[in-house]
Image (cartoon, coloured by chain):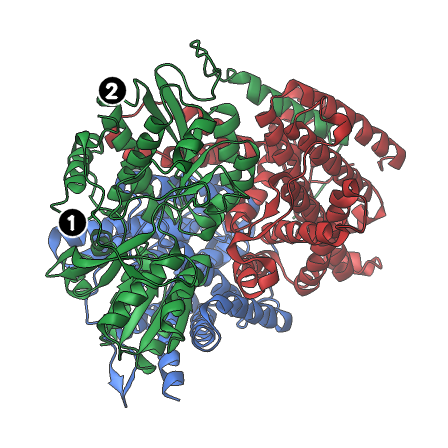
Amino acid sequence: MNQNPRRIVLLTVGGLVVALAGTFLLDPYRNYLLALVAAHLCAIAGLSLLIGRTGQLSLGHAALMAAGGYGYVAGVKLGDGAVPDGLQPVLGLIVAVVTASVVGLLLGLAGARLHGPYLAGLTLAVVLALPALTSQIPALGGDQGLMVPFRSVPQALSSLIALEQWQAWIALTVVAVVLGVLATVDAGASGIRMRAVRDDEVAAALAGIRPGRIKVQAFVLSAAAAGAGGGVLCFVDSGVRPGGYGVTLSLLLVVGVVVGGTGRLAGAAIGAALVVLLPWLIGLGTSGLDLPAEAAQRLDGNLAVLVFGLLLIGLTVAAPTGALGLLTRAGASRKRSAPSIPTTSKD
Amino acid sequence: MDRFVFLLATGIADGVVFALFALSLVLIWRSTRIINFAAAAMAVTACYLALAVTDLTGSYWAGLIIAVLVGGTLGWAVERGVMRAARDPLSGVILAIGTVMVLQALTGILAGPQSRPAPVPFGDRPVIVGGVPTLSPYDLFVIAVAVTLTAGLHTLFARTSLGLQMRAAAFAPEMSRLLGVPVARMRTLGWILAAAVGALAVLLAVPGELGLDPHAGDPLFVSAFAVAVIGGLDSAEGAVIGGLLVGVLVSLVTGYLGAAVAPLGVLALLALVLLVRPAGLFAGVEARRV
Amino acid sequence: MTSRSRPAIRRPATVFLAVAMIGATALTACSTPEKSGSSGEAKDVPGVTRTSVKIGTHTPLTGPASAGYAPISKAAAAYFAYLNAKGGVNGRKIDYVVKDDGYNPATTSTVVRELVQQDQVFAIVNGLGTPTHAAVVDYLNQQKVPDLFVASGASLWNQPEKSPQTFGFNLDYVREGKILAHYLQEKNPDATFCVLRQDDDFGKDLTTGITQVLGKVTAEQKYAVSNESLTAQIGALQQAGCTVNLLGTVTPFTALALGTAAKMGYRAQWAASSSGGDYPSLVGYLGEDVGPKLLEGLVAANYLPFDADDDWVKLFRQINTEYNADAPFTGNTIYGMSMAYTFAEALGRAGQNPTREGIVEALQSGSVKSNGITPAAFSATNHDPFGGAGITVVSKGVQAYLDGQVFTTDAQAGPVEAYTGPAVALTGEGIPGK
């Protein structure tokens, strides 16, 4: 049942190579979108594990991504002059993960005893407090946030690939590490303990597992993944701004988790792709309409939101177990019966 | 001292509105175990129609009745048309988010993005007590509505068989079905009630804010969510106490420390309450997990 | 909640394949973008063909901020429709691509890249908002895309060394604060001056200008847009005995401030910036019944044509009726059309075959005058258009400029001086080059 760690490493590296090669097929803008998908995938995968394994619904992951972003800036500043130029983003990403993990630890400790909506309420309040925090602490740069120096493609590669492709490479590498770690933890003893806690805390406690500690561990792991995603976003966008990490992003991350298929990394990938690409695709579709001034007054912008909302409802109705459930059901119905519970675990 | 009394009065007036909207969230939680993320968008939609009716008839009260009726109808429609598809609380959240997008886009398309002022039925000048402006007649009206509603809902759930059936349907749907409780109908009823209360809350809140626009309910929703969690999602009394607590806290923090600090104050209160009581101040029953 | 273990696809490799496939299919599914400049121009300038110039903007069409700002891009689009109907600029029609960013800086980053890389726009024009546009200003300058007439008065846009492609459009907030404070101080030297402001860079910069002139103010109250109540703040101003309140507020909060003060029976002189002092917009928030009463006597700064009998305003009204579905005519309408006119003027100055470098040079040459009440003064070292503003007052339900109350100043410690020159006059039906 458990996956061999070496196999996970092999698959991660193999998948990464395929994905990196795939970037050559995409133009710069699509590579930029791919980098965004990868950044969101870090956070969605982490959140998916949290919701799917320990049953903790966090609406605070936007704030954790922001923590990663601010951590990235701090790391780059820290490394300025201290480490070789090329290593600054690496240091930035490490500090991003550490920062988000620390915030995650605090949140996890505060939320370990909370159930469902109570945890959701607490974590939502954290996201709402983010703009307040950035306006109160001058070092966080207020609503304009913080910038990091623009990074171009390394000299050795500059004739070969465009900036956006380079950004996609970094993003894909980070997401590969994140997914590899999440898959390893999930496949190991920790994964089993998390599921035990989710299914029945009392029984788990009787079996010698400490539910509170497991939940905090899961929260920290999830926060670290979100922090990595926030760090990547900061790298790609050359800065972090609190306005980008509001309630909307938190809700979108949850949407990404559920529409893909809660608790499954491939589902998270589908969810991340949908969350990032769907608004753009809808925009392409609706901008093709040539509306008279009167209709444009009303429909511009709103039409895209309307379509997104309808698709979201339609998808949830059609695929209550997530898109992945729908795919596996359609593709492999002959092999096994369709899954009916979204928060199922992996083997 | 004058300043304190003034801020206290302001906080109470704001808090009562938070409490009313939190009541709507508590109602849905009690009857379906779902947090209705679409509550604000539904209420705002109802208020658009209410305002249209007030414009048409010139009567505030006609608009108020329409808000409640349309709110209830929307509750019915959303529950029957959308939320039925929810297999678990999580997909309920997603369906609600989709509903928010649809409703906000539709109101944006039909009414435009601009805010419109909302009327008040009474004077909204605060009564001056000892030189300090305190509550206005309108604030007192809102308080009266909140008290009446809380008492009514308390009676419904604690004293009537209908209320008991609604709670049973939410807590133990399988068992209730076996005992002959029309579970589906009870859930729909819960949604209708909750949405009607929500619409009323937003209609009462809008005159104190920037006016009615497709997003007018959003800040109220997040405050009310915090209030409901602080008070305990199962408790109408908790919603009222929580609402007053949050309202007064926000007012005092804004007055003494600055507006930008207020969300930090709410976060601190939330963390403090949940650390001591993980299921809110008025957690009467054992907390259920989602 | 039950759970069962079951086998499923969820190996990292599959994950990557899924992403790659979705990315690729999503993208190959929609046809590759049309390449611009394909109609045989001598030089391949992005967004420019023999018959058209494609430009783009980012602005909130949805979300809470859309209530105040969505009309601006509509007004600009209406002016461009008018311009195109009259033949465009040097035979080229303007194709104005508006992207909704919901006032979210992360979305701004994405849509601006889409405009630059996919839509291949010639320039970004009137990108709206300080935190939003700050997210893309470095990117646009690296890509050498003209970043014209940012819809914000922050000092960020006037950094010709660091951001040579970027030009502002709004009067910068510091200047505006200085001019407002100067006028009020001249008028009531003995007043108790106070400030109510948004807790962000807009409010901060405006207050910097105000205190530059007044020294310390008696009380400074701040609000956050997330909390739609100003009762505590107005109460503090009342208690402090403020008689003249300068507002670093955006339109909805100006309305809320005045409404709240009226409720509390608090009378004072109110003075708003151009970002929050537009009478028609304020009446929209306060209502036709009480609005005019509350707004009587409101002082506001402005730098664009505004009076009802102004030739520009008459033209814009006509364009609004014909090309903008007769939308409510407010300061936003005038702002959007003025900005669009200024772009057309700059494009005309860039010559028969406009290039990205050419339009930046044209602006830096100082030949673009815009249509402000003081002529625009762009130069190689100054990317802020307007050096001055006038004072408007609401009297008997009409907001109009006060005669002889136009001032110029700098964004530093320089003095505020009266401006006696004329406003830029309307010529050629508002079509540059006619």
> Residue visible at 21% across and 30% down?
C323
Q: Colour of chain B?
A: blue
Quarter of image, res A40: top right
- Which comes before the other along the chain, label 1 or label 2? 2
Q: Amino acid at mark 2?
A: Gly
**Is A95 located above or below residue A37 in the figure?**
below
How far apart are the two marked residues, 1 and 2, measured between alpha carbons? 28 Å
Label 1 Cα crowd, 10 Å radius (few <14 / some 14-19 / many 20+): some
Q: Chain of mark 1?
A: C
Q: Is residue B127 visible in the rendered structure shown here? A: yes
| Label 2: which secondary element | loop
For the C terminus of chain C, the image quarter is top left
Residue C185 in the image: state x and y as whole percent.
Answer: 28, 71
Quarter of image, res A107: bottom right
The total number of labels drawn is: 2
Query: Residue at label 1?
Result: C307
Q: Amino acid at mark 1?
A: Asp
Residue A117 in the image: state x and y as whole percent.
Answer: 56, 57
Residue A316 in the image: state x and y as whole percent.
Answer: 52, 35
Query: Residue at label 2?
Result: C87
Q: Which chain is green?
A: C
Q: Which chain is red?
A: A
| Label 1: which secondary element | loop
